[in-house]
Image (cartoon, grey):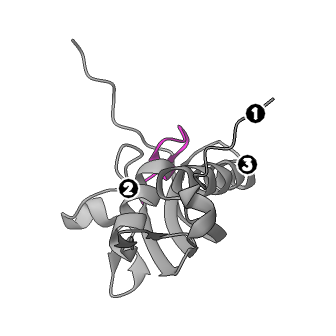
Amino acid sequence: MTADTGHRSAVADFPVGRTELGSISISDRVVEKLASAAAAEIPDAGAAAPRVLGHSMTVAGALGSRQTSLTGLPKATADVDGSIVVLDLSISVRWPASVPEVSSAVREHVRARVSELTGLTVTDVSISVTDLVARLAPPRVR
């Protein structure tokens, strides 16, 4: 037997992002940072290759700019429309890992983490692989 207290759930009374105190909005930039951090949680994915004038520069290290890194954060772009999110990610993949498998793992993990952390619905995660990282820095000696 259950007693009806007369209180209704606040979740059922208001649409996503709205409460009795007003509305809550999450900026595109915040979602981008969350998506980027979530993508970096996949071991074989990392920061995208540096770009110069819109072109990937996988040999940019020779030019004095940063090199591709699996320890850096991937580039993310988010479009938040109400409670719907569309994400674009640019990542690098550790060679010889399978690009489709790593991309799929990143896509599913980012979708789940962003939804979990924000309460938003991620409808699409597009992934561009800009570099395969074959040369890794030697591990630090302790």
Residue closest to the far top = 142
Find residue 2 and name its label.
1
Q: Quadrant of the N terminus?
A: top right
Q: Quadrant of the C terminus?
A: top left
Q: Which residue is depicted at the point 55% across and 50% down?
A: 116
Chief secondary structure of the magenta portion: loop
Residue 129: percent from left, percent from top: 57, 64
Q: Nearer the viewer, mark 3 or mark 1?
A: 1
Q: Which residue is depicted at the point 55% across and 72% down?
A: 87
Q: Is residue 47 magenta?
A: yes
Q: Is residue 56 magenta?
A: no
* Residue named by callout 3: 101
Q: Which residue is depicted at the point 52% across and 67% down?
A: 89
Looking at the image, can residue 41 be seen?
Answer: yes
Residue 71: percent from left, percent from top: 36, 43
Q: Between 56 and 86, which is closer to the camera in this rendering? A: 86
Q: Which mark sits nearer the N-terminus, 2 or 1?
A: 1
Q: Residues within 10 Å of mark 2 (few under 14, many from 20)?
A: many
Label 2 near label 3: C-beta < 8 Å? no
Q: Residues within 10 Å of mark 1 (few under 14, many from 20)?
A: few
Amino acid type for the residue under numbered disc 3 = Glu
Looking at the image, can residue 127 be seen?
Answer: no
Q: Nearer the viewer, mark 2 or mark 1?
A: 1
Horizontal arrangement in the rendering, residue 8 relative to residue 80 (left or right): right
Circle 1: element type: loop
Q: Between 64 and 4, which is closer to the camera in this rendering? A: 4
The part of the chain drawn in magenta is: 39-48
Q: Is residue 77 above or below residue 132?
A: below
User: Marks 2 and 1, Cα distance to the nearest angstrom?
Assistant: 60 Å
Q: Is residue 130 above or below residue 80?
A: above
